[in-house]
Image (tube, grey):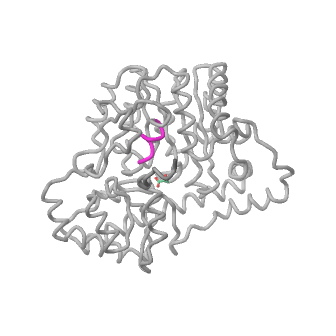
Amino acid sequence: MFESLSMAPPDPILGLNEAFRKDTNPRKINLSVGVCKDSQGSTPILASVKEAEQRLLVNETNKSYLPIEGSANYGKFVRELLFGAGHEILASSRATTAQTPGGTGALRVAADLIKRKLPVGKVWFSKPTWDNHLNVFASAGLAVDSYAYIDAAGQGLDFAALTAALEAIPRGDAICLHAGCHNPTGIDPTPEQWQQIADIVHDRGLLPIVDFAYQGFGVGIDEDAAGLRQLARPGKELLVCSSFSKNFGLYNERVGALTMVAPTAAAADAALSHAKVCIRVNYSNPPCHGAAIVSTVLGDMALRAQWESEVAEMRQRISGMRRLFVDTMKRKAPSRDFSFISRQRGMFSFSGLTPLQVDELRTKHGIYVVVNGGRINVAGMTEGNMEQLCDAITAVIGSAEGRRRMAEGLSPLSGWELPAILVERHVCGG
Ligand code: LMR
């Protein structure tokens, strides 16, 4: 049977990582997958995480299975981080949490739960969105569609188009919102805009699915939850898919959570019971180690303070790289304005480089960025690779091919398509 198979297309993000590893160019730079680098270009383990691991090594007494929904203690820490200690949702116990293998695991459990139990017509995503979103939800058998998000230049939010699109979503559908540090654009609504978004979402009875993968990478740990907390209104329902891959640097430990907020404690318990059915038939129960690290850090005042300062350090480094990139590009390509990059937040920016330019960047210069909008992982830039990176970008936007693409007036979304075969079957309008 396998002999009849041709190769599946590589993943648009993780496939680039594989290609990068095979590339023998000694000057190659990886700005594709969202991993945070330090000024030396490495991804060290956070000191708070190392300390927690040492404590776990000494204190752990067994390796038996976790419950299907994972550790209850971890769930409590997740909810406190999301909503803030003392929030009405916590006081009324109307949220339950399942520990999941990464944020992607949370998204898939959410998708399975919706498909199995909720009367949702379609799930709506910003255009553009993370490359994997549509496939995760379509793989669960859900219909997916997109709503307007960025402006025509691809540099800011088109708030009027966004609100008009939200108003047009049929009542009772689900909508995926990025809590902050939007992936792939780095373009976020302001707190005032979040308030209006939450008004529309709840007025129309839409089910918000909040993807929260970068808490602390925008403005601060609490500040970054502002949009989520706007949506978390009395009596309202929502799903939150969160991840500690980035803010704890626990990429390969796969630590995430699905939090279900319901109008009552009994309804939240019922939601969790169905999420457990979805989990049991998928991966049975979650891995322990990463979540144990998170619980150890968040449960100890000193470790928590250390972690918060490590998150602040990562955030400040990313902002510094944004400024350095803008300044370096100003020097190298003064006719092209990249100042919008320093107004964006989090790890990613939508550079607006076209697919051909992205290809030229990789093949001629050994620089890997994601095709979708020319997404650049700003957190992978360093003082050491900035000159080389900006020289290469200057070369590709100035090359004959680059000029032709710009003259064609291709939109920044030209590299963004609804992905792959699965989505074709489920997406509205084919
Ligand atoms: C990314 O967008 O690069 C990260 O979220 C990693 C991934 O799984 O795609």
* 178, above or below 406, in the image: above
| Location of residue 74 (image quadrant) | top right
Number of marks in the rendered image: 0
Which residue lies most toward the left here?
Answer: 407
Which residue lies most toward the bottom here?
Answer: 26
Query: How far across and how far down the image is residue 149, in percent?
Result: 31, 40
* 386, above or below 338, in the image: below
Q: Which residues fall within the magenta stretch?
A: 131-137
| Location of residue 347 (image quadrant) | bottom left
Magenta span: predominant SS is: helix
Q: Name the residue located 37 percent from the left edge and 54 percent from the top edge.
A: 344
* Residue 136 drawn in magenta: yes
- The answer to whether residue 53 is left or right of residue 3 is right
Screen quadrant of the C terminus: top left
- The answer to whether residue 97 is left or right of residue 189 is right
- The answer to whether residue 402 is left or right of residue 86 is left
Query: Camera-side residue: 12 or 372?
Result: 12
Q: Name the residue located 56 percent from the left edge and 43 percent from the top edge.
A: 242
Q: Name the residue located 30 percent from the left edge and 57 percent from the top edge.
A: 340
| Location of residue 59 (image quadrant) | bottom right
Query: How far across and how far down the image is residue 19, in percent?
Result: 44, 66
Query: Camera-side residue: 232 or 275?
Result: 275
Q: Name the residue located 27 percent from the left edge and 49 percent from the top edge.
A: 413
Query: How far across and how far down the image is residue 292, in percent?
Result: 73, 49
* Residue 165 drawn in magenta: no
* 142, above or below 6, in the image: above
Query: How far across and how far down the image is residue 162, in percent?
Result: 30, 35
